Image (cartoon, rainbow, N blue to C red):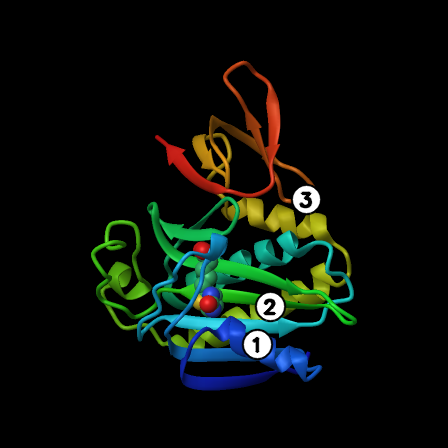
Amino acid sequence: MDYQIHYFKSLTSTQDKAKEFSKKGLSNIIIISEVQTKARGRFNRKWHSSKGGLWMSILLKPKNTENLQHLTFAAAVSVVKSVRKITGIKTNIKWPNDVHYKGKKLCGILTEGIFGKENYVIVGFGLNVNQISFPSDIKDIATSLNIINNKKINIGKLTKSIINNFFDLYNNYYNKNKLKTIIQMWKRYCDTLDKNVTITTRTKKINGKAVGIDENCSLLLKLKDNKMIKIMEGDTRVRY
Ligand code: BTN
């Protein structure tokens, strides 16, 4: 698939820039910025984006915009595969979409839909690559590939690989409605299942055992009284 990459030195957020491109009716556009001054994460949280990371948004115009969770899963899978190939580092996915290394966050994914006469999707990747330090509020929960391997990573090579892997999953599975295969691949790298977890949703905290993923990428949680519930979104903390 043909795509165009646009590089910037600094942006408020690559998501915002991708949105601008969507207003021109464009798609298969990739926005990359060296730094972001107002980046956001899930639940509208602030996302730290200093130099050295990969801050990238992919603007798509898929036929089907009803299964955006599967696109997010595909994005996480593409990151894990590329990180393994280019750096040798084996990372895992925490439901729904954090790529982590030994519990420290390496990559977050933010998928946003733009719904109107035509529907667009923006998949945002925030991957800590070559940073060697983090601000004090996140230094205990975040890490970078450089910190793990103690050497500089070729960010260009890694970016290319992530884009290729992502478009492979997008074209051959997402757009062909082979959503189950995306979930199967995701499960291979997920280390949340069979663990006791605390899920924080917008309104509450729930303890339980993560026992499965349903066809909509929701987490199946078994509560203390053996009741099963489905969680569609939230933050996960694994309780060891
Ligand atoms: C998360 O909360 O884990 C998702 C973080 C997503 C951050 C990326 S960085 C590139 C893109 N631009 C943004 O403003 N956010 C996403």
**Residue ID for mark 1:** 18
Find disc 3 in the rendering and name its residue: 216
Q: Position of residue 174 (x, y in %)?
A: 71, 60
For residue 125, side relative to residue 18 (left or right) = left
The kind of secondary structure element at disc 1 is helix
Residue 85 visible in the snapshot: no
Q: Find residue 190 and report its horizontal and vertical position in percent.
A: 50, 44
Residue 229 seen by the camera: yes
Image quadrant where residue 164 sits: bottom right
Residue reaching furthest front? 203
Q: What is the distance, in whole Å, between disc 1 and disc 2 at their CAs?
A: 7 Å
Badge 3 element: loop
Q: Quadrant of the N terminus?
A: bottom right
User: Nearer the N terminus, badge 1 or badge 3?
Assistant: 1
* Residue at left offset 31%, top offset 62%: 144
Q: Nearer the viewer, mark 3 or mark 2?
A: 2
Question: Which label belongs to residue 122?
Answer: 2
Ligand 1 closer than 8 Å to label 2 CB: no
Marks 1 and 2 close (CB-CB < 8 Å) = yes
Dots 3, 2 in contact, CB < 8 A: no
* Label 2 crowd (10 A; few <14 / some 14-19 / many >=20): many
Count of marks placed on residues? 3
Task: Identify which residue, 39 or 236, lies in the foreground.
Answer: 39
Q: Earlier in the sequence, mark 1 or mark 2?
A: 1
- Give the distance between the C-alpha atoms of the residues marked 3 and 2, in whole angstroms: 19 Å
- Disc 1 residue type? Ala
- Considering the image in quadrants, where does the C terminus appear? top left
Q: Hey, what amino acid is under mark 2?
A: Ile
> Taking 12 as reference, is 114 left or right?
right
Q: What's the residue at 49%, 62% (across, down)?
A: 79
Q: Viewed as shown, does residue 87 lie left or right of 150? A: right
